Amino acid sequence: MDRIRLSGNGPLKGTIPVSGAKNAALPLMIASLLTEENLILENVPRLRDVRQLTDLLTDLGVDFTLRGRQAGQNSMTGQTITLNAANIVQTTASYELVSKMRASFWVFGPLLARFGKAKVSLPGGCAIGTRPVDFFIAGMEALGATIEVEAGYVIAEAKNGLTGGRYRCPRVSVGATHTLMMAATLARGTTILENSAQEPEVVDLANCLIAMGARIRGAGTETIVIEGVDRLHGTTHPVLPDRIEAGTYAMAVAMTGGDVLLEGARGDLLAEPIDVMRRAGVTIAETNRGLRVQRNGADLVAVDVDTQPFPGFPTDLQAQFMALMTRAKGTSEIRETIFENRFMHVQELTRLGASIRLDGQSAFVDGVESLTGAPVMATDLRASVSLVIAGLVAEGDTIVNRVYHLDRGFERLEEKLSACGADIERIPA
């Protein structure tokens, strides 16, 4: 199993290209199941999760071609994937494939909408708390599906197709919003989804579906209205830039007191994290090429944050911000309101010398003068990159184990950081 070694090596300086968003690319790839025509996705990141979803779609019968692997091509820019689901061979998504990544479960919606049946394994995924599929099931039942859960599989049927309906999600769920919105595009009549997720990735999916012929309004608000159509056609769609990757590198730059242009990053996708970082003493400016992040000499200041659904502070940046606050002046309170069990990085950060105490949903971080390198263990995707951020300023070597978590969500992380002066390398297994 690969490891990453890094050592505190001064400020990051240079340019980091921001990849396409994983959290947008995955539902966009799944949307290919809704049409017999080609769906061409541009700026798709090179990630383990993308490869695993490709394996699942291929197992269902989706053909795909990939551009962006030619010799001499910049490995830190996106690739283009063409997906064609004209010849689906089965509507069963196996445990062996779905268990590797929770987002795989989202094929449930498009398969049921287009083929009138689906058998999808209950998902596995990273250990950051319960994310039940009850919302997905109740939403599909509101669209007329008959559903049973048997032997670890969700078995759904809509013999005469889905019909429009009204569904209010008990709790904001990005995955349920993606899945139900895709399914509703081919349902007869009007579907109204209330308490919907408002994340940019939901809007990106809606924009792609609209380009495919869907009739959707309200994406990006809590109420989405979908008028079902008989069929969807192909289109070409660019994946939006990854706001979580951009926010992560912004915090890495802030941690080291650097000056980096995050090429392609969009400030409108990061309004709350940018505000929080500015209050912490970081300078962030929008340019025509992206976001320029600087912290030259000024101390970091402790800031309190609560994670919230978009447009609030994202839970996917909570661990990274906690790492940043370990070196801030004062005490910050970081409250996690989205997922339970998402403080597993705390124990590993304390191995590097951080001072953190937990109280229920809150972590209280007392800033320290310095961190010291040590072997640490990645427990999930965002936790693992928080250890990298801390290691960038820790004295001596930090060894991050289980970096396969990083490969799920960060494209060429060590290459991007080393290009800006970081002392970082991957140690092959």
Image (cartoon, rainbow, N blue to C red):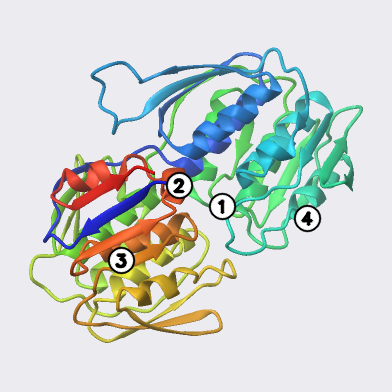
Label located before the other in sequence (4 or 2): 4
Whether residue 184 appears in this view of the structure is no
Q: Nearer the viewer, mark 2 or mark 1?
A: 2
The amino acid type of the residue labelled 1 equals Thr
Q: How far is disc 4 from disc 3 in space, using C-alphas?
A: 35 Å
Please give the residue where the numbered disc 2 appears in the rendered image.
404
**Number of labelled discs?**
4
Q: Is residue 142 left or right of residue 301?
A: right
Please give the residue where the numbered disc 3 appears in the rendered image.
275
Label located before the other in sequence (1 or 4): 4
Image quadrant occupied by the C terminus: top left
Q: Nearer the viewer, mark 1 or mark 3?
A: 3
Q: Are marks 1 and 3 in contact (CB under 8 Å)?
A: no
Mark 3 falls on what kind of element?
helix
Label located before the other in sequence (2 or 1): 1
Q: How far is disc 4 from disc 2 in space, using C-alphas?
A: 29 Å
Label located before the other in sequence (1 or 3): 1
Q: Is residue 376 left or right of residue 221?
A: left
How packed mark 3 is, by other alpha carbons closer than 10 Å (few <14, some 14-19, many 20 or more), is: some
Label located before the other in sequence (4 or 3): 4
The amino acid type of the residue labelled 4 equals Asp
Please give the residue where the numbered disc 4 appears in the rendered image.
134
Please give the residue where the numbered disc 1 appears in the rendered image.
221
Q: Nearer the viewer, mark 4 or mark 2?
A: 2
Q: How far is disc 1 from disc 4 in space, using C-alphas?
A: 22 Å
The amino acid type of the residue labelled 2 equals Tyr
Q: Going 28% across and 33% down the picture, which residue do you hit?
A: 76
Mark 4 falls on what kind of element?
helix
Mark 2 falls on what kind of element?
helix
Q: How far is disc 1 from disc 3 in space, using C-alphas?
A: 22 Å
